[in-house]
Image: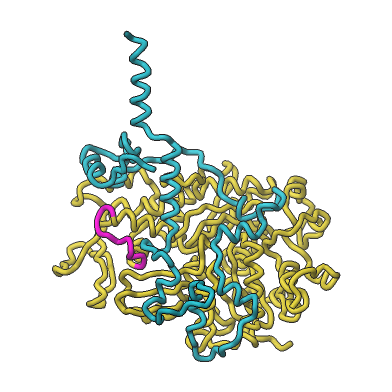
Amino acid sequence: MKPSTVIILDNGASTIKAGVVGVHNAQPRVITNAIVRSKGDKATYIGHELEKCRDYSSLHYRLPFEKGYLTDWDAEKAIWDGLFSQEVLAVHTAESSLLITEPYFNLPNLQNVYDQFVFEEYDFQSYYRCAPASLIPHGELYAITGLPTPECMFLIDSGFSFTHVVPILDGAIVWNAVKRIDVGGKLLTNHLKELASFRQWNMMNETHIVNDIKETCCYVSTDFRQDMEASHLSPMDNPIVQEYVLPDFSANRPGRVRRSGEALDEQSQVMYMNNERFTVPEIIFRPNDIGLEQSGIASTVAHSIGLLPEDLQGMFWANIGLIGGNAKFPGFRERLESELRALAPVDCTVSIHSPKDPILEAYRSGVAFAKKPAFTQQAVTRAEYLEMGNNASRRKFRDWKPAPVDTNKGAEQPSRKGPARPQRMDREESPPLTRQPSKGKGKGRATTARR
Amino acid sequence: MPPRRQPQRQTQAASSYLDPEVIAKRTKRHLDELEKSNYAEPSNALAGLEEDEDTPGGRSVKGKARQVVISDKCEWPGMPKKKSSHNVRTAVLYKKNLDKLVEDSGIATLPPEVPTYLRAAAPPPREPPRLTCSVCGYWGKYKCRKCAMPYCDLNCEGVHNETRCERRVV
């Protein structure tokens, strides 16, 4: 088969990062993963069409994702149709291959629907599906000139729906140590919406505006106690308070932070951002503060590393990487570093890699992966799908699947260097994280879904 | 009569402090609210978008509400209209919420050593929650005796009582 066009689709719950390998290598198209109704415009925008929106007040969102998982396929299909069409990527899906991301621990029944859409609706030639973190080892995040990519990586993916801590060993996710905190950008925006609506302006219907306020004003405090005291001072000598000038869509003026001494006209409405600036992102570090009974991000990292083979733990502490939109909060990395330093064993180095753009990192790594022969080898082809149905991807993809425990195969994991593999892992590890795809094809195990 | 006073005090205490279960319920409800995509969800969230564009009366013979399929309505340049397969059609037409999907997936029945969505939540926190004033956001030193929301001073207590106090939380 001649090499076909490869499309990368980092299908986030908030934005889709998509592009064609060779065309959008560094800069994908970023489109909203939602169907949005604007009252002011009296129009409905599907995915990429949101760019045309003029009036961002009181938008009504229909999101294909619920709590991080793809549940509304009708909405998603409308958005994907638009994405593949002339209006955005202008690709012939039947003559292309696809690399698509799925949520961590995607449900097996949902994985089947992914397969069905890819092969039955869009007729892709072949496709590969994995969690965003699986792509990162192919990217530049851990690249230091002169050094090989580390064997152990510890990724923190803090996105729109939730935050995951993901250890990666030799390029494969160690699923039994992956942990989830149910705090993501959506929760933070909604929390800020509540605070602002109670304290100042009613913004309960202004998701878009409040999200912009969050992205503009919020930061992660490196000293919560001190910032709290500072924010309690009078506005004159309060270093924290900012005035956010709310947007005026009738005058086509976007929202912004008021510069000191800047004069405002009478119609401008101002929202004061004081302790809201740092108490909102704080929830990622202390979910308990809003009553969510989960550890903060630092303790969860420590917990997860504790589940890994002891002799490798130090390597994980030294190779922490940040991806996902929340990593863009100023101070996020500094705060995380200081909290992790306090939790790590004294003789361990804690070092955090943060990409230039944490939102695009998975996409860019995906581009690098798609160029490797491994992509073609591991992808499921349409012919394989037609032969084996959903079993094709279940057998071939290296990512999470609810495979029955098959301890014998765990031993033949590829490319473990050195004999230092501790016993503990062998026993505790859930089903083989990697399966050699070549075997077992058509050995009579394709019991379901032949069509 | 000293023995009589004690039970009296106890009943008073019981009425002014809230059942932790009630508070847990309130917290749960609040967390669910933080998951919403829109604050004001119309009763039929899917139909809400379409109502103003559709002609009424499009009900099927069986009396089922008409299927609102937004993906059918859009036509994009360069995307051929095609008949979707049965599987795709089913996924598009019958939306299931996450709880139902988790139930259907059968991941709950997998052996405990298999990591799944259900077993991946972060461990419970070690530190107690820090209370911040539900009115202004400063440290919440005091708690409302009626609804257990924290506040920081007399001023905020006044605001709380006027606007926010739920008195009894259900």
> Which chain is rendered cyan in the image?
B
Compared with A340, A30 (above or below) is below
Which of A437/A202 is in front?
Answer: A202
The residue that appears at 31% across and 40% down in the rendered structure is: B167
Furthest residue to the right? A443
Q: Is residue A207 magenta?
A: yes
Q: Which chain is yellow?
A: A
Which stretch did the figure color magenta? A198-208
| Of the pair A121 and A49, the residue shown nearer to us | A121
Residue A303 lies in quadrant: top right
Most common secondary structure along the magenta stretch: loop
- In the picture provided, is A309 more to the left or to the right than A231? right
- Which residue corresponds to the image point at 67% horizontal and 49% vertical from the top-left? A308
Q: Is residue A69 above or below residue B28?
A: below
Residue A55, x across and y down, in percent:
31, 76
Please say whether residue A144 is visible from this viewpoint. no
Which quadrant does the N terminus of chain B fall into? Answer: top left
- Numbered circles on residues, count: 0
